[in-house]
Amino acid sequence: MLTTRSQRWRERRARFVDDLTVINPHDFAVDQLDPSPARRFVAAHHYLPNYPAAQVAVGLFGKQAALVGVAVFAMPSTGSVITRHTGFANPARGTTLARFFLFPEIPGNGETWFLSRALRVLRRERPGIDAVVSYSDPQAGHIGQCYAALSGAYRGRTKPRTAYRIDGVPVSGRSLSKIRLGERGAAGAIDQLVRLGAPRPEITEEPGTWLARLRRDRILVAEQTLGLYAYCFELTPAARRQGRALPRKPYPKQLPPAHPEFPFMDAA
């Protein structure tokens, strides 16, 4: 099944728009977005409601300056995300596009129009960043069609991984690691799981024991998932030089079968 539509999000429900309409640049503006409204927008509308460790957030604004889309560039879970897909030895030379979505009413080419301008804002605010890595999750209905339209380098598919959910909502593996190891940010990660419906740890309960209890009681559910599609936007001549030694594969065009955890996927 070849996709000719874009997946949009509003109130954490997916909608699809065709590619027959074209955005009018005079109707929209793009600029840096403060963390608080970006965090609220993601929590209210995206299927991954938790806010990442953002470096720069960029907003798409419509009529009356209403926020209708967001791009959040964030620190990766590990530096190897950047080094593997950009070729830079220093992971600070890259960032990840951790959240990116628009409302369904935005015309069909809104993603490419918005993202191209969001990347300019990123370079303006963080000139030391040369490349952006972004993943598309085919299990959630994403193949990176808009990334291909912007000539992002497709690096291939990552290995299958274990994903964690509470009441159907994805939980970051990095958050679980912070809790288990008692790292900085562990208290906030615990609060996040509690907000999703997990019972709070007992006063004398060790973090690892608490997580094991959540797994045992099927509150925290683990599942093996499909690999992600990895893309890299090489924003500077230096990034393009680094990328020459890395794979640039043909773009994926087919979605996998619908997954029971994602009933909103439309494979028609």
Image (cartoon, rainbow, N blue to C red):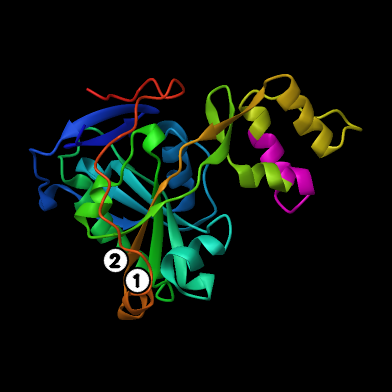
In the displayed structure, 106 sits above or below 165; it is: below
Q: Amino acid at mark 2?
A: Arg
215 relative position to 141: left or right: right
Q: Secondary structure at mark 2?
A: helix
| Residue at 34% over, 33% down | 141
Q: Which residues are magenta?
A: 179-192
Can residue 107 be found in the magenta stretch? no
Query: x%, y% of residue 108?
Result: 15, 40
Residue 120: mark in rendering: 2
42 relative position to 3: left or right: right
Q: Residues within 10 Å of mark 2 (few under 14, many from 20)?
A: some
| Residue at 9% over, 44% down | 22
In the displayed structure, 78 sits above or below 13; it is: below
> Is disc 1 in contact with disc 2, using a CB cutoff of under 8 Å?
yes
Query: x%, y% of residue 222?
Result: 62, 30
266 relative position to 170: left or right: left
Q: Amino acid at mark 1?
A: Arg
Location of mark 1 (residue): 124
Q: Quadrant of residue 268?
A: top left
**Residue 228 visible in image:** yes
Query: x%, y% of residue 50?
Result: 53, 39
Q: Quadrant of residue 127?
A: bottom left
| Residue at 81% over, 38% down | 207
Towards the viewer: 217 or 119: 217
Residue 101: mark in rendering: none
